[in-house]
Amino acid sequence: MVVKYQDFSYPTLQLSSALYAVAKLGIAEKLGFDLECKKKVSDIAKDLGANADYLFRTMHFLAVNGCFIEVPNEEGVFKHNDISLALVDPSIRAETLLINGVCHYRSFETLDETILTGKCQSGKALNSKDVWDFYAKNPDKEVDFARAMTAKTKRLAPILATLGDYSDFDTVCDIGGSQGILISEILSKNPNVKKGINFDLAAVLGNIKSEDRVHPVDHRYSECPGDFFVRVPAADCYILKMILHDWDDNKSKEILNTIGKSMNNNGRVHIIELIRDNQNPIDEKYLASMDLYMLQLFGAKERSLKQWEELLKDTPFVIDHVKNSAIPHGPNIIVLRKK
Ligand SMILES: C[S@@+](CC[C@H](N)C(=O)[O-])C[C@H]1O[C@@H](n2cnc3c(N)ncnc32)[C@H](O)[C@@H]1O
């Protein structure tokens, strides 16, 4: 039993650090871009100007734990498996750097205190008010965060822009739209939309680099800095993609109430989120992981449909209908209308 437990528990922290290191150093790309590529670790190390023995030991550890294959009978030679090959995708690399980066691993130092007190203690671990305050103080880390969000959104935007119906709206506003990927995709798929507003914190909009833009800037696209607890621009449709899972029920209600005050008549809100009881069964591991991130980073959660309905009671909105993207790890669109 002890041996089984040790095999389970010893590698956990190192998996995160080793994945972060190989992602940061671009090892997967150096190895090659398909399952047939193989390379001597000493050649990769030489190329990087890195220590060959240390790189070998890190890759050996990862291979033993399911990422990369150590080629039998060819000393120090590695090839890809499905897991390591995923890392050559720049969007997966960006996600890996965020998920295993400093903000996340520091935040989790106080999980035990969060559980004991029932209050999110990531701010204490980060020496900041909360995660957003940490990012405001560390703009380079905020860029890592925004790039990872963009990476996920880039993969999903083409599906979401057609899953949602935007044919009736003149103005669509993406609340917390980060680098503007989804609203740009919606504009490109919906010529009827006259105005697409990307609304986010001033610091986040100010950090958008031209290389992060996927679409040339459309004349209908605009950026509006602001705080969704204070005021949002007037629009016919508001998108909240992966926003409310970052906030507890009271704060989520505040955001929805702010939107309710600015929304044009017959408007809609599109909440784009995972729904606990509406996901594909293969999403369970991902869902549980996302839920624990939300708990420790923000004192928030992934919600079931019942929890969404409950949350909406103190807001001006009800659920009109739900659209399921039906792809693995894919979110749903919960369409709200005014009561
Ligand atoms: C989890 S990210 C989601 C980004 C984007 N919607 C996506 O799915 O790629 C949350 C976003 O909310 C923004 N945000 C946080 N607090 C905010 C506030 N008070 N007002 C406006 N935006 C805020 C963050 O800057 C960040 O871009």
Image (cartoon, helix red, strand yellow):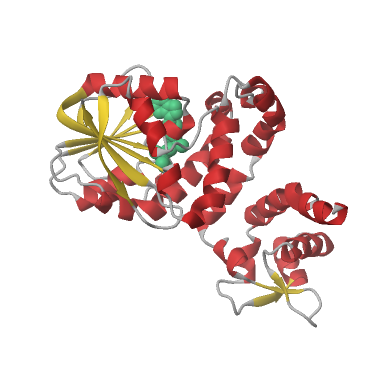
Name the residue rendered at 51%, 61% in the picture.
89
Q: Is residue 41 above or below residue 200?
A: below
Q: Nearer the viewer, residue 228 or 293?
A: 293
Task: Tell me the quadrant of ligand 1.
Answer: top left
Residue farthest toward the bottom in the current orientation of the protein? 73
Question: In the rendered view, does 185 fall on the left or right side of 247?
Answer: left
Q: Nearer the viewer, residue 161 or 280?
A: 280
Q: Is residue 192 above or below residue 264?
A: below
Name the residue rendered at 78%, 49% in the picture.
9
Q: Nearer the viewer, residue 281 or 222?
A: 281
Name the residue rendered at 77%, 80% in the picture.
72
Image coordinates of residue 25 in percent, x first then y, are: 66, 56
Image coordinates of residue 127 in percent, x first then y, are: 67, 22
Q: Is residue 66 above or below residue 99?
A: below
Residue 58 appears in view: yes
Question: In the rendered view, does 188 fall on the left or right side of 62?
Answer: left
Quadrant of the image for the N terminus?
bottom right
Image coordinates of residue 329 in percent, x first then y, are: 46, 53
Query: Can you tell which quarter of the image residue 45 is in?
Result: bottom right
Question: In the rendered view, does 95 fall on the left or right side of 71?
Answer: left
Query: Can you tell which quarter of the image residue 219 is in?
Result: top left
Image coordinates of residue 197 in percent, x first then y, are: 26, 34
